[in-house]
Amino acid sequence: MISKAVIPAAGLGTRFLPATKAQPKEMLPIIDTPVIQFVVEEAVRSGIEDVLIITGRGKRAINDHFDRSFELEAYLNQREHHDLLRQIRNISELVELFSVRQKEQRGLGDAIRYAQQHVNNEPFAVLLGDTIVESDNDKPVTQQLMHLYADVRAPIIAVEEVPRDKVSRYGIIAGKEVEKGLYRLDRLVEKPSPEKAPTNLAIAGRYILTAQIFGYLEHTPPGKLGEIQLTDALNTMARHEQVYAWRIAGRRYDIGNRLDYLKTTVEFALRRKDLAEDFRAFLRDVLREPRGRRKTRARSAPRK
Ligand code: UTP
């Protein structure tokens, strides 16, 4: 029933400057794979056939990444790097990709508005381009949302349980659990204090939206910084029609913030067969030894 996904990837990524001055944060690698590739792969594994990426100024690398690169293919072919060649070709054959440019970075809500023509009144999935979401079971979170949509026929927001003392970093939902893990949304609260937070369920960067969202976005006034927030539009929507939230069994990795980026890199490296053993030994070493001693040892090593 849902065949299209929208991946907003036009944000300026100011929290990751200077790395994002001339390259999109969505192209930051987790070891050797850009974040947005994980996101597109989740959409594909979920059964999405058509992906629209919202890009903007300075985001050309995203289009290039999913395009074919004949020079690179010829180079790898000549040197008989067959595995790499296969990987590179697979990326450009993942899915039918479209892109549209957000003219000014006026927030996530504004970015979604650029999808209106493309989704053509159909419900669609939204996957934030700077967020990897891993499911604890073999069904990707977007696919779980797509299946739920077939039942509830209303917008659904994926949410993740976060520690109470961290709620002030997130958009938090208020709602009533109507089935295990499924909430009827009452409202969304942006970055509440732990005392004021209605739940500890944080918006996790995956959504199913219906075309009605465009009407709400059109009437959502920009906030203090001139940005149109998707959460504001969803709040108004929840007042007029049914909106759901689905508590995911899994983990969200928000690459847009530095600490999470580092944690993601470490976790993913520890799962990689080709790296895990050496990397784990290295981490043990780093954590065991006081910094001063490491330096001394490094300096004295060549003399031995
Ligand atoms: P963020 O809320 O992380 O904003 O965007 P940002 O501007 O990219 O980053 P900071 O806060 O300046 O560091 C969440 C997702 O929405 C997209 C981003 O690319 C990211 O994938 N986005 C955000 C847009 O597409 N357009 C916008 O105007 C803002």
Image (tube, rainbow, N blue to C red):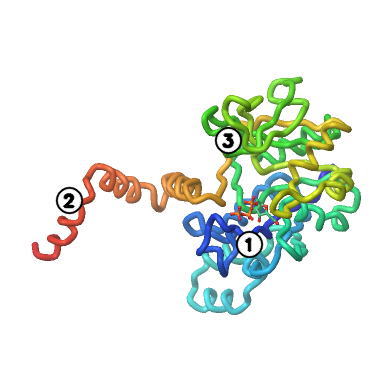
Q: Residue 61's quadrant in the figure? A: bottom right
**Which residue was labeled with disc 3?**
168
Under 8 Å from ligand 1: the CB of mark 1? no
Q: Residue at x 74, y 21 (%)?
A: 176
Q: Is residue 130 above or below residue 22?
A: above
Q: Residues within 10 Å of mark 2 (few under 14, many from 20)?
A: few
Q: Nearer the viewer, mark 1 or mark 2?
A: 2
- Observer-nearest of 157 and 84: 157
Between marks 1 and 2, how big is the CA–CA gap? 44 Å
Q: Which residue is mark 2?
A: 293
As drawn, the label of residue 91 is 1
The percent coordinates of residue 243 (x first, y second) are 81, 32
Residue drawn at point x = 77 percent, y = 51 percent:
222
Mark positioned earlier in the residue sequence (2 or 3): 3
Secondary structure of the residue carrying tag 2 is helix
Farthest residue, direction left: 304
**Looking at the picture, which amino acid does disc 3 mark?**
Ser
Along the polypeptide, which appears first: circle 1 or circle 2? 1
- Nearer the observer, disc 2 or disc 3? 3
- Mark 1, other Cα within 10 Å: few <14 / some 14–19 / many ≥20: some
Residue type, label 2: Arg
Q: Of label 3 and label 1, which has the lower sequence position? A: 1
- How far apart marks 3 and 1 lie (CA) works out to 37 Å
Query: Depth check: 94 or 295 in front?
Result: 295
Of labels 3 and 1, the one closer to you: 3
Q: Picture coordinates of residue 288 (x, y %)?
A: 24, 42
Task: Identify which amino acid the numbered label 1 is placed on.
Answer: Ile
- Disc 1 element: helix
Label 3's element? helix
